[in-house]
Image (cartoon, rainbow, N blue to C red):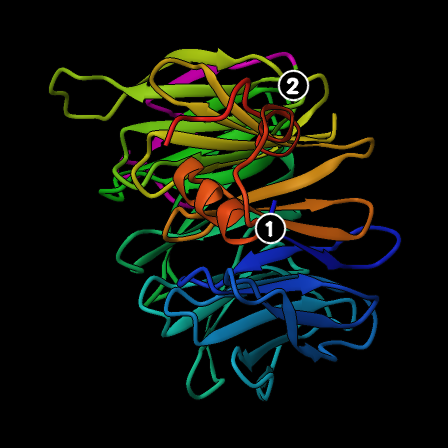
């Protein structure tokens, strides 16, 4: 463990890493966002943004790391300079509530769910609202762009998944899960041809976005579905190369899927194995850039690293007496960040080699066996 960051006593609202892995935005108080230097020589707060009047709901970095977008209790979506904290836009909205912000892949647009069960899209440079995507009034809990930014999907209560054209605002498809399972997370396939949805009742669906039909009609049509567990699926992520999917379950397991090896018109993911070790609900999953290691967080107070192919646990980064609320890898894969409900954000070194180098840089001697077990969570110190 390399750093600790003070948050609020009641817990952290959100945590978001910049794409270069050197800065982190943290929901630190009832109405502010803090930005921290999280490089190995950092461990200092860079600035605090008085972001909203009332609680800050969420904040995300743009893919180039230059901007932060935040939503809050005051019903606004605001865009900030990530380096200086300067307000660039307080974006006009048609409703008094927006949530779940998402940047387009080219960072030219930012979207968020609105109170009417639709999605508003703004031009990031001008702050002009360029599209309002209309749903059917059900509350939305997940918003995501496809890989080229030409489409946007949103899902929410009642198991509805909507698909829109981001240029014209035309609704292209409306799907619904067979048991009205509320959507907790949405992920596009790398080619943009499928949407993977993860539901409150533990079911994972694969939707083919080209399925024909009247977009004004709800159709229960999907490529495949899998009952992952008899519990809520809280978080999900696709590896950067698209070979694996990981899902956080409230059954104390992280579940891993691997893409079917044989060629197929539709990508199919087969259940690989559960990752067994947590003793509480799994709240977050995150892949490293090469897709061979998964980090997971849990209500049991631990953050763990796993070998994706074997399912073996590689290490336990922390073991606390309070829940861990979420986890993420830095874009370079060197660090893991975790949020705890004690109000602290912790950043860990993920690489054993780098962890040993860091330990040696802070000591004038080698580590003892007891120190390797206590601080590095190793059964014995590695040989030099």
Which residue lies most toward the right here?
Answer: 9
User: Residue 32 appears in which quarter of the rendering?
Assistant: bottom right
Image height of 109 relative to 310, above or below: below
Q: Which stretch appears magenta?
A: 206-230
Residue 114 on image: x %, y %: 63, 62
Residue 63 on image: x %, y %: 39, 64
Q: Quick check: 295 left or right of 10?
A: left
Total marks drawn?
Answer: 2
Q: Quick check: 7 left or right of 295?
A: right
Residue pictured at 56% horizontal, 35% vertical: 367
Q: Quick check: 323 left or right of 336?
A: right
Residue 270 belongs to magenta span: no
Disc 1 packing (10 Å; few <14; some 14–19; many ≥20)? some
Which residue lies most toward the left here?
Answer: 263
Residue pictured at 63% horizontal, 31% vertical: 371
- Residue 218 visible to the viewer: no
Residue that numbered label 1 is attached to:
2
Task: Give the mark, 2 or 1, whose residue is nearer the N terminus.
Answer: 1
Residue that numbered label 2 is attached to:
278
């Amino acid at each position: 463990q390399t750093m600790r960051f003070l948050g609020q006593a009641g817990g952290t609202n959100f945590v978001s890493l910049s794409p270069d892995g050197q800065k982190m935005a943290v929901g630190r108080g009832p109405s502010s966002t803090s930005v921290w230097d999280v490089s190995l020589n950092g461990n200092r707060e860079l600035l605090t943004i008085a972001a909203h009047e009332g609680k800050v709901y969420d904040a995300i970095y743009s893919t180039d790391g230059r901007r932060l977008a935040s939503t809050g209790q005051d019903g606004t979506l605001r865009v900030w300079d990530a380096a200086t904290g300067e307000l660039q836009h307080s974006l006009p909205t048609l409703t008094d509530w927006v949530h779940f912000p998402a940047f387009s892949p080219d960072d030219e647009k930012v979207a968020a769910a609105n109170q009417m069960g639709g999605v508003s899209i703004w031009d990031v440079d001008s702050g002009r609202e360029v599209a309002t995507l209309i749903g059917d009034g059900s509350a939305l809990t997940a918003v995501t762009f496809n890989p080229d930014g030409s489409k946007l999907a949103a899902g929410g209560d009642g198991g509805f998944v909507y698909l829109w054209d981001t240029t014209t605002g035309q609704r292209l498809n409306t799907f619904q899960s067979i048991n009205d399972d509320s959507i907790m997370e949405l992920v596009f396939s790398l080619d943009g041809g499928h949407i993977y949805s993860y539901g409150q009742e533990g079911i994972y669906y694969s939707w083919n976005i080209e399925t024909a039909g009247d977009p004004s009609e709800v159709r229960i049509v999907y490529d495949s579905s899998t009952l992952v567990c008899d519990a809520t699926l809280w978080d999900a992520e696709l590896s950067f190369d698209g070979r694996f999917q990981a899902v956080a379950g409230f059954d104390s397991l992280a579940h891993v899927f691997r893409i079917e090896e044989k060629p197929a018109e539709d990508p199919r993911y087969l259940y690989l194995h559960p990752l067994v070790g947590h003793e509480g609900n799994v709240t977050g999953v995150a892949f490293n850039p090469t897709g061979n290691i998964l980090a997971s967080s849990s209500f049991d107070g631990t953050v763990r690293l796993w070998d994706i192919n074997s399912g073996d646990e590689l290490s336990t980064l922390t073991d606390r007496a309070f829940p861990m609320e979420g986890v993420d890898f830095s874009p370079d894969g060197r660090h893991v960040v975790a949020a705890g409900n004690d109000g602290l954000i912790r950043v860990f070194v993920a690489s054993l080699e780098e962890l040993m180098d860091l330990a040696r840089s802070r000591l004038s001697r080698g580590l003892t066996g007891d120190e390797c077990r206590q601080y590095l969570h190793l059964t014995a110190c590695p040989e030099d």
